[in-house]
Structure formats: C-alpha cells, structure tokens
Image: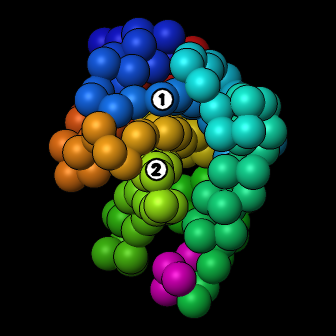
Amino acid sequence: MPGIDESLLEAMRLPGARGALVVDWISGLALGAVGEAPGGDAEATAAETAELARLALESPTLVPGAGGGENGDENGDENGEATVEDLILTTADAYQLLRLVVTPFDSTVFMYLWLDRRDGNLALARIRLAEMADRLVLG
C-alpha cells in the first residue's frame, strides 16, 4: 500500500499531470506536494482547494444530509446518505480534480491533481485518482 510520496509520484505519471497534492481539508495544509501548482505556490493551492472541499462537504444544499460535523464522516455513506467522492474544476487550459480519501478513522484528506487540458484525459485521471485514493496509506 503506497504512502503519500508514492501516491503523488504515481499521480504525476498520468498524461498531462502538472502537479499533485495531498491536503488536509480541515487545516488547509499540504501533507505532500509534487510538480507545479497553479500560481506557483503549493501551500496556497492547498489552502484554497481545502476551502472548496470544505464548502462542498459541509453544504446541505450540495450534499443533502451533510451536517458539517466535526467527526469527518459526513462523506461516508453507511446510513445511505449522499456522499462527495470528488470535485472537478475546469478552466480553458486545465482540469483540477479533488478526490476525497476515505479512511476508517477521520476522513479529512483529499488528493488534488492539476491536469493540462490539452494533454490530459479527465476520465482516465478521475478513475486513476480514485484508485490511488483507495490505496493511499496515511500515517
């Protein structure tokens, strides 16, 4: 089972990958980073994407049943509630993917991938990022 560094390097092997991060969405801190970041600052990217993830995860409008609880399990579906799997932001020249990492304890981490739109394949990247997130070992 790969750790953060191995998962980030694997993400960078995707066609069109420009940069990747593992981020704690509660604190906004990057737990790992590789490659480039939009604007050139990985920490700023981590903080800003964490805010986006937090808004989505805590929004009862976007995710019915989400309560913004402190326990981090609102993206789990053991009660049959809707869950956030990933977020995709598209711009004229890039895709930005955020994939939530589900863990048996506190699920407050996501993987972020910055993908060149011309060279990347959004569908493939989404599938592979989901696989990486499922195998990621934290700690």
**x 67%, y 51%: residue:** 49
**x 61%, y 44%: residue:** 108
- Residue on which the image places disc 2: 94
Query: Is residue 51 in view from this perspective?
Result: yes
Mark 1: which secondary structure?
Answer: strand
- Residue on which the image places disc 1: 18
Query: Is residue 65 in view from this perspective?
Result: no
Q: Which residues are magenta?
A: 62-66
Distance, label 1 to label 2, CA atoms, is 9 Å
**x 77%, y 30%: residue:** 41
Give yes or no for residue 133 being in the magenta stretch: no
Name the side, left or right, on which 118 lies relative to 138.
left
Of mark 1 and mark 2, the one earlier in the sequence is: 1
The quarter of the picture where residue 68 lies is: bottom right
Bin the neighbour count of mark 2 within 10 Å (Cα to Cα): few under 14, some 14-19, many 20 and up.
Answer: many
Give yes or no for contact between labels 1 and 2 (Cβ–Cβ under 8 Å).
Answer: yes
Total numbered circles: 2
Relative image position of residue 115 (x, y in whole percent): 42, 40
**x 56%, y 17%: residue:** 34
Residue 120 or residue 27, whichever sits in front = 120
The quarter of the image holding the C terminus is top right
